[in-house]
Amino acid sequence: MSVEAVTLTNEIAARRRIGAVAALSVLVVILMLISLGIGPVRLSPLSVAQALLGIGSEVSQVIVREIRLPRTLLALAIGAILGLSGASLQGLLRNPLASPSLFGAPQSAAFGAVLVIALGVADVRSYALPVAAIIAAFASVFVLLSIAGRNAGLLILILSGLAISSFAGAATALVMNLSSNPFVVLEIAFWLLGSLEDRSFQHVMLAFPFIIAGGLMLFSQRHAFRALSLGEETAQSLGVDVGRLRLFVISGVALGVGGAVAVTGTIGFIGLVAPHLMRPVIGHDPGRLLVPSALAGSALLLAADIAVRIIPSTSDIKVGVLTSIIGVPFFLYLIMRERRALGGGVA
Amino acid sequence: MNEAALLTARGLGVRLAGRVVLNDVSLALEAGHLVALVGPNGAGKTTLLRALAGLIPSEGEIGIGGQTLASLPLRERAKRFGYLPQGHVVHWPLPARDIVALGRYPHGATDPARLSPKDAEAVLRAMQAVDVIEFSDRRVTELSGGERSRVALARALAVEAPVILADEPTASLDPRHQIDVMQNLRATADKGVLVIVVTHDLGLAARFADHVLVLREGRLVSQGAPAAALSEQVMADVFRISAYRAEYQREAVIVPWADI
């Protein structure tokens, strides 16, 4: 076999990956158009596109560009950062069951935000909210990775994740418990369910800087994840600064998830599901999974947010509830598949 | 200290969690040698290997090709050592060629899909050297233990570093694959690379190594040509065994025989 033959194999795989990313991008755009068209006034994708370009009726322009666009943009960005965070954590821990929600990151972020709301130190649209959420998310991921140590098995990760998310849940409950204002409690409860309803450009401005910063931090580490496939020691011997990589991932996930949770509440399981959907198409290379997982995360959250608006129900279904209802059985399915590794054997 | 030495250590010491694991180890090893690092369990063999590669903090001074290791940034260290850890762990089912291509990571080839012709040639050379080209496209997780050990070795060779550090590369392999791995390492050394192999197999050490280092409780207690370094006295003191000793095809034969 010649050098050409070795590089040729690469090109076929590369073409398939590019095709998958292109197809996903198209899907995301279509879902965005549908998302912008759904609501009390239904608009066709064509009139949505017209409104976006500034043509068509003034009413539909206002509806699309001012009322619905923030919601759609948030679904796009938050889905993407959740998918990217999941793929990054899976890459860092070399473990297909890793994800922000299983590690209690969104739950902890929610606690940080809830504390700020309940204390009344800031209103729900100030930067205090994402900052508190980010700090809490950072603390949770940091504690989890410290407990897990260098070569954590699945069981330790999942048990510590369970402990951290339970603790964050209990702390949130305590805050609500102690809160004297029933309206604040009601507001917190609704917001905890995770929703994209009635979000404005203020929310977009609140979340986007953190999501973009977190996303860039995670994406910058894509090659290191690949080297980490061989274990931390070998990656280090190849020139990867593993300590720095961990700090980047913890910070990136905290910024992204914290920023997202601050405006939508907890939306779980996108980060777990998205990389899994991509592996059969993209392959297992953790560096190449990042961008497709982000796109898949966007598509999933956009689709879920469309679904909650068209599923007929007496009261609004929150999108965070829907993603968990679908995500948890998926998680169980993954546990079944990974049973051998969980049982202590070598997968 | 030997002027011709490629890798030197002076007063090397390592503490892990307050315990002295490696104590005042000094050595000078030459390019083109296959060096076997032996010693009872817990003697500090893996620790010495890690310390030499700069993977763990240590006291003392390590020199590589005339430079001190401490003065080199991570990436430069990575170019000087091909490190092969125990167990040949690969966490994702990646194709064998992508694994081997990771050996070019220290040279800036961080994406196996975009190898420069120079890097691609190095990958190919490494794969040819240990004969793994035929399963280039197969996932490493689907390979047998022997095949996987060869892919792991190819990955370490692809670094094209002056030093290869291999931690028990023959563990859990059948006799034929053990010899296969050692022959590959021997051939690598014959091309001018310094190869250091941790092994519990004194027979393989005696058969293939130019130089044997014997560690006991963190100290280097004996070194030299196999038959001398693994003298009857050393076998008794360090390993607490007696051995059958002979010579076959001008190589030392040492077969552990009984405990004493």
Image (cartoon, rainbow, N blue to C red):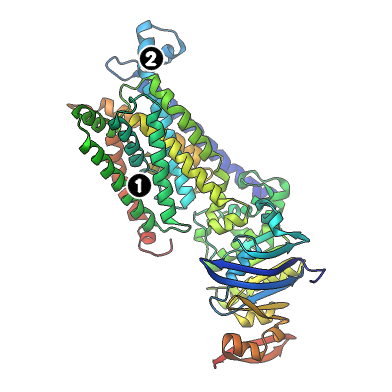
Q: Please give the chain letter of the residue carrying mark 2.
A: A
In the displayed structure image, the side of residue A173 where residue B97 appears, left or right: right
User: Please, which chain is the residue tagged with disc 1 on?
Assistant: A
Picture layout, residue B60 above or below residue A282: below
Front-most of residues B258 and A291: B258
- In the depicted view, which residue is nearer to us: A176 or B224? A176
The CA span between labels 1 and 2 is 35 Å
In the picture as drawn, the residue positioned furthest to the left comes out as A314
Residue A44 shown left or right of residue A25 in the figure:
left
Q: Position of residue B154 (x, y in %)?
A: 64, 61
Tell me residue B84's x, y (percent).
61, 63
Instruction: Locate the C terminus of chain A by quadrant.
Output: bottom left
Name the amino acid type tagged 1.
Leu
Specify the quadrant of the image occupied by residue A317: top left
Mark 1: few, some, or many residues within 10 Å (few <14, many ≥20)?
many
SS for dot 1: loop
- Which residue corresponds to mark 1? A102
The amino acid beneath tag 2 is Glu
- Residues at discs 1 and 2 in contact (Cβ within 8 Å): no
Instruction: Decide: few, some or many residues near mark 2? Use Cα within 10 Å; few <14, some 14-19, many ≥20.
Output: few
In front: B2, or B191? Answer: B2
Q: For this view, does A133 lie left or right of residue B64?
A: left
Residue A267 coordinates in the image, percent (x, y):
33, 36
Per the rendering, the mark at residue A66 is 2
Residue B155 visible at all: yes
- Residue name at image x 46 percent, y 12 percent: A53
The answer to which image quadrant residue A169 occupies is top left
Residue A132 in the figure: left or right of residue B200: left
Q: Residue at the location (30% across, 30% down)?
A: A117
Residues B60 and A265: in front is B60
Instruction: Give how far across and how far down residue B115 sits, in percent.
Output: 67, 46
Choose the circle earlier in sequence order: 1 or 2: 2
